[in-house]
Image (cartoon, rainbow, N blue to C red):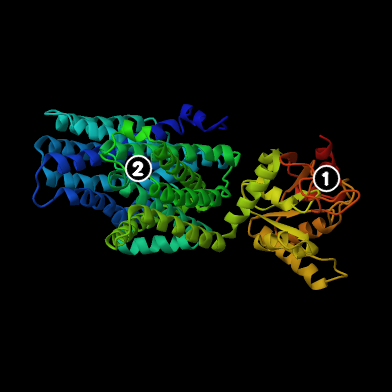
Amino acid sequence: MSHPNQFALLKQRRFAPFFWTQFAGAANDNLFKFAFTVMVTYQLQVSWLPPTMAGLVIGALFILPFLLFSATSGQLTDKYDKTAMIRFVKNLEIGIMLIAAWGFYSANVPVLLLCTFLMGVHSTLFGPVKFAYMPQVLNERELTGGNGMVEMGTFVAILLGNVAGGLLIAMPEVGAKLTALSCVAAAIVGRLVAGFIPSAPATDPDLKINWNPFTETWRNLKLAHGNIVVFRSLLGISWMWFFGAVFLSQFPSFAKDVLHGNEGVASLLLVVFSIGIAIGSLLCETFSRRQVEIGLVPLGAIGMSVFALDLYFASRSLPPVASNYTVAGFIAQPAHWRVMADLALLSLFAGLYSVPMYALIQLRSVPTHRARIIAANNILNALFMIASSLIVGVLLKSRFSIPQVFLCVAIANAVVAAYIFFLVPEYLLRFVAWVLSRCVYRFKVQGDEHIPAQGAAILACNHVSFIDAVLLMAASPRPIRFVMDHRIFKLPVLGALFKLAKAIPIAPRSEDPVAYDAAFEAAAKTLRDGDLLAIFPEGGITKDGSLQPFKGGIMKILERAKAEGIEPPVVPMALTNLWGSYFSRVEQGNAMVRPFRRGLFSRVGLSAGEAVPASIVSPTALQARVQALLAA
């Protein structure tokens, strides 16, 4: 089931038919919507739907079902086979597109508005299925790559759908007919491909459907709030949609009024933005070492704010023009390359921001409720996008320029991101671990498949430096709670970091018996909760670089766990080549006294061995296993 990279998933039946099904659906959505918008704006004279309102009405009708029916679609996805749900949705799409084809052929605007609403229903039903299907067929090490592929595919499909819709409907005399045929053909292709998707059984087949969308919506939001990390991740994703909606909605006006470009320039901005998100989404697997790496989320948030802020300054320094630019004329101006670079990079960082959050929600949600959690995400996304439209409208009415709107969003993004990371410190901790393991050291992990993906376990590692815990965090896809020497908590920066990570301070019984007993109680609770617990059995950082004798604390932890009916496996681990680095001691001095004494990007490693059953663990045998990993 493993793959060398995310693109290899496109050769596997469990993923490829699903990918192309969702690709065809996203492309068809946007082909239909954009063609309809262009038809009403440029080709028809409808007194009750003026061109200035057409885009707003079509967008509102499409998003309304997300508010009304997301809760119901989440229940249906949890209750029924997801593949059956996908095929049902694709059958529905064919029916809707047949009605839409007649609407295009007869230029019947009310029928096309109805189809817009129905396509919103189609997308509402498909959303929870899309994100609940992936964690059912992909393992934890494939989730980030799979989500990156889907995110990339979605934005490429949106781009191609918009381009195709605009080109087809603009063809003289035959535009409406070709658009109608294309919409039906895309729906049929999607359904044919969906026939190859393997079965994905129901996760909660006994669920009783609550058909009241209002009470179920409230219940879904409460359900999502039950896991605070997941709920705040939902808020983080919804904020990303708020952020993106501001830019996407203002591209036409930004191109015309600020950049002095024609319609082609507006399309170019959309292309640049879409390509940026696609690249950022694909980079997530590379940057995360094929695990769910939420440390990328703060990196993405920083990039989004930095380049949105620079876009404001780039927009203010544009040269005066006498007439509107064509695409060729726009590209010929060097000042415009900075604008395009800002758009590409802020969208790239938006991809780095969103993909790990989606993967985290899929990984941390209870499988029986996963689709309903994702439905709650869709509800929040819709609310945030509506709020985005209202707030931007108020700012523009208040005579803010479009670049000033971008500036406000850049500042707001920094504030919101800081607030989320303060509420959920795991994001910040993983970011620190990610930066340290990639920007200070060249960190190579071997045997990480031995770290259990689920359930309680103890990680036993040698203790070489003050950042051993940070490197272990970087190597594990799951949160780890550490038992650490209480003196480390007194260090100015690292101490605050470990307190934020809820590390467990331990002191010798002779020095502080209360802290000693509290540490073992906290360790037992960690294992009772089914989480990972890490200890450094040497009892302190090595003073000469060699492995010190293991103490008996691990046996006390195991004895207490056994008394509570828990026998967690113990995973031996060895940090290599850290001795002599800035954060470790050296023979003639203390740690952290001479920065970069081994330079940047020095090579360090972590090796994990096979898990040892709790029943045969002893300090001596465990030390021998760690020593063997060091010697390997």
Q: Is residue 59 above or below residue 7?
A: below
x, y percent for residue 270: 35, 40
Q: Quadrant of residue 22?
A: top left
Which residue does the numbered mark 2 point to in the structure image?
85
Q: Which residue is mark 1?
A: 579
Q: Secondary structure at mark 1?
A: loop
Left or right side of 511 for 312: left
Q: Which residue is rendered at x = 82% and y = 72% of the image?
A: 513
Query: Neighbour class for label 1 at 10 Å: few (<14), some, many (≥20)?
Result: many
Q: Earlier in the sequence, mark 2 or mark 1?
A: 2
| Residue type at the position of mark 2 | Met
Residue at left offset 52%, top offset 47%: 356
Please indicate, yes or no, whether residue 87 appears anywhere in the rendered image.
Answer: no
Relative to 508, is 252 above or below?
A: above
Left or right: 625, with 566 as reference point:
right
Asked whether 522 or 260 is in front, the reply is: 260
Q: Residues within 10 Å of mark 2 (few under 14, many from 20)?
A: some
Tell me, yes or no, if residue 157 can be seen here.
yes
Helix, strand or loop for disc 2: helix
The percent coordinates of residue 328 (x first, y second) are 32, 30
Quick check: 466 above or below 180?
below
